[in-house]
Amino acid sequence: MANQEDIFKKVISHAKEYGYVFQSSEIYDGLSAVYDYGQNGAELKKNIREYWWKAMVQLNENIVGIDAAIFMHPTTWKASGHVDAFNDPLIDNKDSKKRYRADVLIEDYVAKIESKIDKEVAKASKRFGDSFDKEQFLSTNQRVVDYQAKADEILKRMAKSLENEDLADVKALIEELEIACPLSGSKNWTDVKQFNLMFGTKLGASADSAMDLYLRPETAQGIFVNFLNVQKTGRMKIPFGIAQTGKAFRNEIVARQFIFRMREFEQMEMQFFIKPGTQMEWYEAWKEKRMKWHLSLGMGADNYRFHDHEKLAHYADAAADIEFKFPFGFKELEGIHSRTDFDLGNHEKYSGKKLQYFDPEENKSYVPYVLETSIGLDRMFLAVFSNSLQEEELENGSTRTVLKIPAVLAPNKVAVLPLLKRDGLPEVAQKLVDDLKWDFNVDYDEKDAVGRRYRRQDAAGTPFCVTVDHQTLEDKTVTIRHRDTMEQKRVKLSEVKDIISKEVDMRYWLQKIQ
Ligand code: ATP
């Protein structure tokens, strides 16, 4: 089996080769951690956004959507805590001059310990065969127990030091663990410093009257400042939610791993306003609801797990991540945060405006608590894309590269292929395209042998191919081929639209989350 790094490289090159993701400004050698979506990528991204929007807004009577501006009044970011606390601890290596996130260096060290545990498990599993009990092994094998204790101890100490802003101890930990610069092997480190992740910019033309602004580092604040506008004009009753998708910007220090960590990215967030004291119920409910959404795409339950936060952000009283098994291991895909009344309360304080809800049942006003679900659209894109890219051994000994994107999200739903470029076949095929294009994105391809065209569509992620041949002229039937099974069926031309609809319509996929 290819190693993780090779698989990830394949994902990146396939994304480029098939028009999904390009490096931004590539002709100028690119811009680090900024990416453009190509003709297929833009469609996949749009479909993921729509799948989320429908699940959150359209299917929930008590959730509405907004579209707030990227620029916000600068006091927003004082109130939200981002000016003071939206920092990453960074450390420089004096020899290689490379900059790292101190917490990431430590987490990578712990990941190495964890991979040693995995190796022990794999070895034991081979030795014991069917009688292997993983849970028992993890809790009784002394070497594994020691590894786990060490990993836990390191993470606990790091969380405590970061919580207490004890950056000297974070550096001490890096030195005690003898962590070396991955590039140079040098252990010659600077002190750990805090680095604010917000991008600054200016509003206004003249130097003295210009106002310092930030590009929003999260979309959530656009929702909080509009809480009353939406509640009043929509006559919303608690509990209710406001959803939004849009760009966010962070000056990430360690920008690597392709579209996993970008400087300009898109978030899909929903803030659910609730009665104080009910947050734990809603926290559990939304964890479950969001996991169901993920599972509805059929990408394998084993690829997801919850990770509860030990170190809570400045605004949260409970937080969990939904992690996904990316090509480089399990990493955060979505966050579910119980944000208490931190944001609305602070906006009240800084704006001097009341941001309260009159609860007719309680006959009193209060600042609502907030439960947030926040997912990165680009990260979801990477999850879908990397999980879908597969190399398959075929019965005849050859291999095929296939992009098994869930049909509901695929950029093109169907490719129409005339078997030959003559005998009137292209005309019939084109007529079918003209009919189908009202419902789906359709590709038309008449170049090369049909087998080659099937492979091309497999690699591009198109779930169906419809082939028009001489028999079509006689009896108005076509061959429909499924990408995933490669099964081919003869069907009536008039049935093609319904057959595809049943497989790609969001209605059928989203019914699984109800
Ligand atoms: P991380 O720990 O990976 O930096 P985070 O905990 O800072 O992420 P949140 O602030 O909770 O992330 O943001 C919510 C979601 O936005 C994340 O779950 C992720 O999917 C997405 N996201 C955050 N930062 C980035 C980024 N730089 N590039 C792409 N997506 C991002």
Image: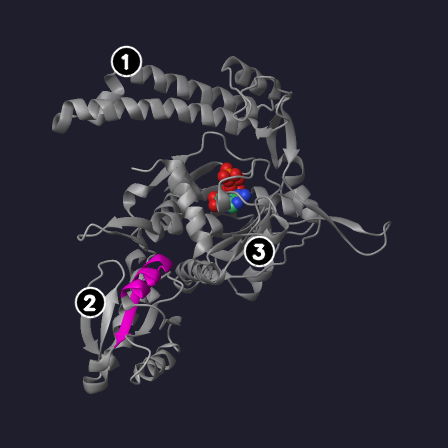
Helix, strand, or loop for circle 3?
helix
User: Where does residue 490 sit, x and y in percent of width and height?
Assistant: 18, 74
User: Where does residue 446 sit, x and y in percent of width and height?
Assistant: 35, 73
Q: Amino acid at mark 3?
A: Phe
Q: Amino acid at mark 1?
A: Gln
Q: Is residue 279 above or below residue 142?
A: below
Q: Is residue 297 left or right of residue 308?
A: left
Q: Residue at x 49, y 19 (%)?
A: 157
Quadrant in the picture for residue 48: bottom left
**2 and 1 marks in contact (CB < 8 Å):** no
Q: Is residue 43 above or below residue 162?
A: below
First in residue order: circle 3 vs circle 1: 1
Which span of residues is magenta-colored? 451-468
- Which residue is label 2 attached to? 488
Across the whole image, how many numbered discs are drawn on residues?
A: 3
Q: Which label number is shown at residue 142?
A: 1
First in residue order: circle 2 vs circle 1: 1
Q: CA distance from mark 3 to mark 1?
A: 54 Å
Helix, strand, or loop for circle 1?
helix
- Which residue is label 3 attached to? 227
**3 and 1 marks in contact (CB < 8 Å):** no
Q: Which label number is shown at residue 80?
A: none
**3 and 2 marks in contact (CB < 8 Å):** no
Quadrant in the picture for residue 120: top left
- Residue 380 can be seen in this image: no
Q: Residue at x 38, y 63 (%)?
A: 59
